[in-house]
Image: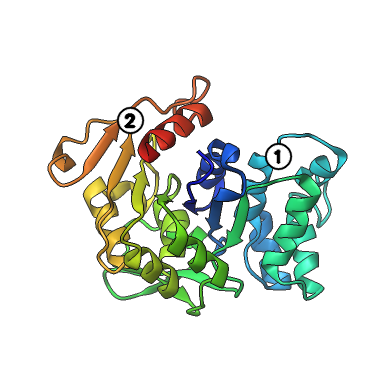
Amino acid sequence: MNEHQIVAIGGGHGLGRVLAALSDFGKNATGIVATTDNGGSTGRIRECQGGIAWGDTRNCINQLITDPSISSMMFEYRFKGQGELHGHNLGNLMLTALDNLSVRPLDAINLIRDMLKVETQIIPMSEHPSDLGALTADLRKISGETNIDEMSELPLRLFLDPEVPATFEAIEAVKKADLILLGPGSFLTSIMPPLLLTGLGKAIGENNTAKVVFIDNLSKEFGPAGKMDHKMMLEWCERACLGRKVDVILTDKELVELQQEYDCKTTDLASLNHDWRHDRDKLKQAIINLLD
């Protein structure tokens, strides 16, 4: 199992779930994490401190902690009360503090990983601050993930503002990957932002030996992404990756309309407790089956 190099791309809870399923692969599994979030604790920190969005990275690390400790409780701690700290996550503040100390973002993540004994590699999609933007049908520009999630219509296209380079290590991981996993998660605001980085999309497009897999959500999204069918989502991904076709769709549905064009692997992936959340063990087995 451990000779394979697997790269998972996305953000938030979805990517964290995939990385938790891949934890047995250790350093041979890499998560490339979206850094454009502007909501919640992350958004408040970015508004007053600047920097990349740390929330999705923190979420991924949280889902990879296997040995609870004082360190892990600190990292996961969220302040409550009436003051300015209310709602802030200490993990976000720790990563921001390291960034302010001029520690390279990737080095900051590695310091936290070492402290929490997390083996899986986690790389921010870019180490430069950028926001997700959308262009509407009447050519208005919408800025920020939270505003894009609230759009009543599907955007014509997405872009990064400003355009920033992908992290070098992220590109290298994609070049060496045997398996590249896209999703699950919020399509427009978690899966697409990393693919909008020219270097990352190009690296996926030029890796002809890897298997590119789209992991389907178990329930339909709210907001503008909910207006997209599977065919449209796949086309957006493929366009960002220089036209590179997705090889496999991992889904719990019968996608009859796609079966002639794509290899659709239909299997039960849902958690017993929450049918909208992927079960780690089922996801792990489905991914191992793809490698075999």
Crowding at dot 2, Cα within 10 Å, few <14 / some 14-19 / many 20+, comes out as some
Q: Mark number for residue 65?
A: 1
Give the left or right position of residue 217, taking residue 33 as reference: left
Mark 2: secondary structure: loop
**Residue sticking out furthest to the top:** 272
Contact check, label 1 and label 2, Cβ < 8 Å: no
- Residue plotted at (50% across, 28% down): 279
Q: Which image quadrant is residue 67 in?
A: top right
Q: Position of residue 127 (x, y in %)?
A: 61, 72
Q: Amino acid at mark 1?
A: Ile
Give the left or right position of residue 232, taking residue 284 as reference: left
- Residue plotted at (57% across, 44% down): 16
Instruction: In the rendered view, tell whether residue 155 sits above or below residue 280.
Output: below
| Residue nearest the observer in this picture, 179 or 13 | 179
Crowding at dot 1, Cα within 10 Å, few <14 / some 14-19 / many 20+, comes out as some
Q: Amino acid at mark 2?
A: Asp
Exactly how many numbered labels are in the figure? 2
- Residue plotted at (52% across, 47% down): 15
Q: Position of residue 155 (x, y in %)?
A: 32, 64
Give whichever of discs 1 and 2 has the lower sequence position: 1
- Residue plotted at (54% across, 42% down): 2
Q: In whole angstroms, how far apart are the C-alphas of marks 1 and 2?
A: 27 Å
Mark 1: secondary structure: loop
* Residue behind mark 2: 252
